[in-house]
């Protein structure tokens, strides 16, 4: 009987050891992220280090940029989220109201790091038409940096490549074009729910029919996302970028009643920018 007790104790001790040895779960403090981004960016604006939205706006007309991008990964990471989340950033703009001396944010969008020296990517619409004091990013570990330049952009494809102050960032690589049916993974910030992971598949490629993006190729996916996810990377199983979150479209059945503008809700179409549209803005640097 004594040996049985000892064996049981050993099992419990081993279980406790294995549990305590496991890494901490990535618990996200949403309020801390958005408040620290607004406060940190506000201080940079006060110091005169942040270009205004009006200064950046003409740079959205730049068509291409010359940068050296990392080579695609050929190995699957042990955990894709742990491997790639540090390369995803939150983007916000700040302004001051007339009722208090504090800086305020306009919510947050998503972006991702393309090079170690501060080149990053998000959607064109994140920068377009904003009348704010400046834009900035926050990395997962709390680093705040101001957007200093837009390097290239495409309104049609909804892509903007920009640079922030600083270096030593962890980049993602541009991967090959994803095929219909391929698995993909998204890390983004839906409605300030920061670093949310979803997964799904590529459902189709098609031509957009909207006024600003008419004729652009879009990649429809089944992975879920929402407002604030704009600019989030769509990753293959090796952690390479194969697309970027752009927009959603809700489909409703036609209403049978004249008093109702819409009938029953049916589904959401989730659109991404394909990686080919991002790659088109990057001119390879001659070696």
Image (cartoon, rainbow, N blue to C red):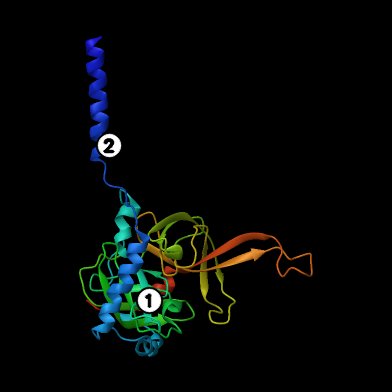
The residue that label 2 is drawn on is 19
Question: Does the image show residue 176?
Answer: no
**Number of callouts:** 2
Q: State the residue in front, 285 or 39.
A: 39
How dense is the environment of label 2, judged by Cα within 10 Å: few (below 14), some, or many (20 and up)? few
Q: Tell me the quarter of the picture where residue 50 sits.
A: bottom left
Confirm or deny contact between disc 1 and disc 2 (CB under 8 A): no
User: Residue at image x 46%, y 78%?
Assistant: 125
Q: Position of residue 79 (x, y in %)?
A: 32, 49
Horizontal side of residue 147 vs 109, given as left or right: left
In the rendered view, would you say 110 is above or below 15? below
Is residue 140 found left or right of 206 in the rendered image?
left
Q: What numbered label is drawn on residue 104?
A: 1
Residue 88 picture location, percent across and down:
34, 64
Question: In the image, residue 241 lies at what x, y percent?
Answer: 38, 64
* Apparent side of residue 253 relative to residue 204 in the rendered image (left or right): right
């Amino acid at each position: 009987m004594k040996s049985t007790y000892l064996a049981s104790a050993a099992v419990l001790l081993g279980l406790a050891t294995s549990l305590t040895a496991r890494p901490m779960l990535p618990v996200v403090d949403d309020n801390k992220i958005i408040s620290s981004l607004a406060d940190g960016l506000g201080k940079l604006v006060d110091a005169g280090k942040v270009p205004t939205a009006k200064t950046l706006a003409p740079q959205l007309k730049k068509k291409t940029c010359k940068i050296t991008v990392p080579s695609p990964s050929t190995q699957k990471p042990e955990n894709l989220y742990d491997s790639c989340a540090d390369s995803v950033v939150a983007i916000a703009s700040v302004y001051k109201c007339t009722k208090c001396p504090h800086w305020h944010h306009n919510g947050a969008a998503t972006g991702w790091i393309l090079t170690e020296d501060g080149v990053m990517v998000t959607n064109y619409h994140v920068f377009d038409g904003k009348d704010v004091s400046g834009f900035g990013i926050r990395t997962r570990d709390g680093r705040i940096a101001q957007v200093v330049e837009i390097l290239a952009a495409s309104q049609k494809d909804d892509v903007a490549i920009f640079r922030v102050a600083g270096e030593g960032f962890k980049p993602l690589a541009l991967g090959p074009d994803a095929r219909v049916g391929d698995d993909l993974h998204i890390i983004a910030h839906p409605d300030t729910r920061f670093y949310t992971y979803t997964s799904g598949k590529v459902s189709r490629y098609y031509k957009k029919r909207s006024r600003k993006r008419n004729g652009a190729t879009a990649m429809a996916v089944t992975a879920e996302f929402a407002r604030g996810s704009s600019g989030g990377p769509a990753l293959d199983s090796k952690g390479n970028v194969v697309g970027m979150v752009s927009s959603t479209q809700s489909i409703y059945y036609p209403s049978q009643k004249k008093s109702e503008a819409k009938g029953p809700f049916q589904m959401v179409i989730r659109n991404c920018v394909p990686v080919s549209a991002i790659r088109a803005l990057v001119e390879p640097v001659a070696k």
